Amino acid sequence: MRVHILLGAPGCGKGTAAKQLVQQFALIHLSTGDILRDAVSKGTEIGLRAKAIMAAGKLVDDDTVNGLVFARLQGETGNVLFDGYPRTLQQAEALGDFLSSQGIELGLVVDIEVPESVLEARVVGRRVCSNADCGAIYHLQSMPPKVEGVCDKCGSSLKHRADDTSEAFNSRMVEFNKTFQPMAGFYKAGTQYRNVDGNRKPDQVFESLIQIFKEHA
Ligand code: ADP
């Protein structure tokens, strides 16, 4: 078993790329954003705590997120793709310790790089399928659904995430700019680290990712 990691800013395309990669390479998709949103929608204790933090674009505390992730990894045997985790140096270190303790190998760490100037428009125009099992991602301008407000894949309604407003985006970028470099620095010296240009069409980004994962997945 191996875990791969996708890194990048809010709106860099991690979620879209992860959905494509897990299909292509039969990986298990582990998105901490999705896990937390599921907890919020089910009203669990963690969800109740996380709801306002997430809507404000702040980060949920490291211990809570690490705990959720490690619980999901226990008993897993297939190769995993993380999307949105780790996000802080503390999470990266805790994950490293957990993987060593379980004898799990760290696979690729791929950073999807997008200039900050294009991220806000991506996030504010993003619409996502309200059916959590589908979770397809659209964009009002660059990837609109065939019928407005309706998911092409499953027919469910599309929604605008509570944290995909300009205001929450700005706060997500503040968090990102504080935490990203120390966390990415943890991986940059390692042989697993790669970066791709995410300022291209999703299919082009996916092509680059396929090349990387073909050689190393
Ligand atoms: P994005 O990567 O586009 O910001 P996500 O769906 O990954 O969106 O995350 C949405 C929100 O969930 C984050 O703004 C944060 O509040 C919370 N979250 C997700 N992953 C983590 C994490 N690893 N650590 C702390 N908070 C997280």
Image (spheres, rainbow, N blue to C red):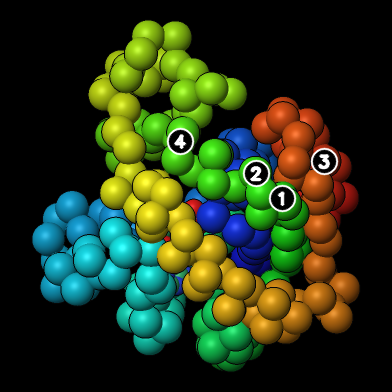
**Disc 1 target residue:** 114
Report whether the residue tagged 2 is closer than 8 Å to ligand 1: no
The amino acid marked with disc number 2 is Val
Q: Element type at marker 3?
A: helix
Quadrant containing ligand 1 reads bottom left
Q: CA distance from mark 1 to mark 2?
A: 7 Å
Which residue is disc 2 drawn over? 118
Q: Nearer the viewer, mark 3 or mark 1?
A: 1
Callout 1 crowding tier (Cα within 10 Å): few <14, some 14–19, many ≥20: some
**Where 7 falls versus 162 (above or below)?**
below
Disc 4 marks which residue? 126
**Residue 201 at x, y = what percent?**
72, 30
Q: Is residue 59 above or below residue 167?
A: below
58 lies left or right of 79 = left
Measure the C-alpha gap from mark 2 to mark 3. Answer: 20 Å
* Kind of residue indicated by mark 1: Val
The reply to whether the C-beta atoms of the residues labelled 1 and 2 are less than 8 Å apart is yes
Separation (CA) of disc 3 from disc 4 = 23 Å
Q: From the viewer's perspective, is the residue at label 3 or at label 4 nearer?
A: 4
- Whole-angstrom CA distance, mark 4 to mark 1, is 16 Å
What residue appears at the point 42 percent right and 49 percent down from the top-left corner? 166
Closest to the observer, 22 or 189: 189
Percent x, y of residue 13: 61, 44
| Type of amino acid at the residue the image marks with label 3 | Ser
Q: Which residue is mark 3?
A: 208
In the picture as drawn, the residue positioned furthest to the top comes out as 147
Asked if labels 4 and 3 touch by Cβ distance under 8 angstroms, the answer is: no
